Amino acid sequence: MTPSSPAPPFTTDTLRALAQAQGLTLSEPDLEGLLPLVQASRAVLGELAAAPLDDVEPTSLYRML
Amino acid sequence: MADLVWASMGELARLVATKAASPVEVVQAHLDRIAALDGTLKSYITVMGDSAREAAKAAEAAVMAREAIGPLHGVPVGLKDLYCTKGVKTTGGSRILGDWVPAEDATVVTRLASAGSIMLGKLNMHEFAYGPEGLNMHYGTPWNPWDPATHRICGGSSSGSGAAVAAGLCPGALGSDTGGSIRIPSSLCGLTGIKPTYGRVSRAGALPLAWSLDHVGPMCRSAADCALMLGAMAGYDPRDPSTSVLPVPDYAAALTGQVKGLRIGLLRQFFLETAGAPQRHAVEQAVKTLEGLGASVRDVTLEQMKYAAGVVAAVISVEAYAYHEAWLKTRGAEYGPDVRQRLLVGAFVSGADYLKGQRVRRLLRDEVDQVLGGVDVLIAPTVPIEATEVGAREVDVNGRREPVRPSLIRYTRPFNASGHPAASVPCGFTADGLPIGMQVIGRSFDEATVLRVADAYQRVTDWHTRRPPLGA
């Protein structure tokens, strides 16, 4: 896969495999209900790719003030 | 007794201190009103009647003995049911913690008690604070007091706090705010609520939704009461390493009523422009009122707000999943279906996406800091819509159909990401008599100016003094 390859679409099979890898047991109705939420989440997270991050570091949890 | 349940926290403190009212009668008036109305409103999960009456007797004895008393002596308060209370169950609005009894109080509970407050009970909320509507399938969804005929949402997640304070079932309450959960119910229930700066108030003993976005704050019927309550709660806490060592100002003393010369930045793009017509009109009128008091107003823009949804989605989903992971694996069926589904989404967000969210979050925070370098406060609507009927998934906004949930948090979540203090202040009503809120955002750790603006506005308007149509 080259860096410019688009990410493959998430399917219930993708979710099932990822869930199993994390020790989550999800039924088929669970997976079908989750899929649109995960797809929506990936879409909104994808919008962050356009942010001009350059060398911006993550916000730290604890402010020392 | 009706006057006591509508008195402000400041008035109640004065009445008690001057022996014009007994804490016992103040507490009993509120317990009577809870008994009369909360079967429908469902704002409380646990009413602490016996302990509240005992505390009231002790408070009365202290006054009679002329002991030194705190600024909230004898004043009742409600606690969102995610604040730990020693010996009293703390459910988080969930079945999973339905019988959990903490061994110690949250720091804010201890501080309110030290200031003299009497705990009336634990307030209903969206399960584990994960929802802006304030729904709850386990304890019943709180009913917005402003429409007795139709079951409308209070907004969440602090929905019980919103219903209880609006209906006179407590004069002030603790809320918590991860994406808007103090400001949204304050707006939809006609209250004044403030989300302080991240680090201003301890989160120790508060059940987390997302550690780096959670804020603790008060919901009251006026900015003056918020100042009183926040002053009792704020400040460094060794139990919460994210709290600041900066000194806490006297918030009540900051309420001068003066805004002459104050510079207001009006957030039109992304905020006002997309609000419903009643909300936009009410906020524009409120800004004119502040102009009339001597403030100057200019439009400002936050370009990075287009990333706010992605930032909060990345951070909240991963942090919430991390907290709930073990329960999701072993007790998943005990969650409400909507909350369980949303929590599970976090299992499919990568570590890289989480950190990208935290990196973009810095852009948001820096931009808000930069814009607030040129003005003293920002103003925007709190939410673009009115309180919807329970169960509604879409709402009409200026002829467009929009989903309710993202609409509710659109204007509030950016300031959870940035950490700046933000209050919601009543600024009008829709044609159907439902409250509208204006958001006032300030510089980091400058809650005093936010509250001063809110209080100055409330000195010349009466939106915050109106009462829902519930009878006496």
Image: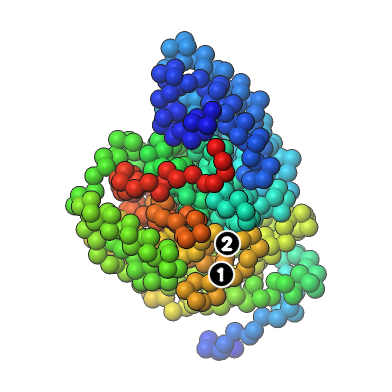
Amino acid bearing label 1: Val
Q: Which residue is mark 2?
A: B388
Taking the view exactly as shown, the residue that stands out farthest to the right is A27
Q: Which mark is residue A53?
A: none
Q: Is the residue marked by circle 1 packed among few (<14), some (14-19), or many (20+) residues within 10 Å?
A: some
Q: Residue at x 20, y 52 (%)?
A: B294
| Disc 2 and disc 1 in contact, CB within 8 angstroms | yes
Q: Which subunit holds the residue at mark 1?
A: B
Left or right of B360 in this view: B121: right
Mark 2–mark 1 Cα distance, whole angstroms, equals 7 Å
Left or right of B317 in this view: B337: right
Q: Which residue is mark 1?
A: B395
Instruction: Return the residue nearer the eye: B253 or B327.
Output: B253
Q: Residue at x 43, y 64 (%)?
A: B278
Q: Quadrant of the C terminus of chain B?
A: top right
Q: Is residue B464 visible?
A: yes
Name above or below for residue B244 compared with residue B21.
Answer: below
Q: Secondary structure at mark 1?
A: strand
Question: Percent position (x, y) of residue B376?
Answer: 26, 55
Instruction: Return the residue nearer the eye: B181 or B110.
Output: B181
Q: Residue at x 70, y 71 (%)?
A: A34
Question: Percent position (x, y) of residue B413?
Answer: 47, 61
Q: Secondary structure at mark 2?
A: loop
What sort of colour scheme is used for the picture?
A: rainbow
Q: Quadrant of residue B103?
A: top right
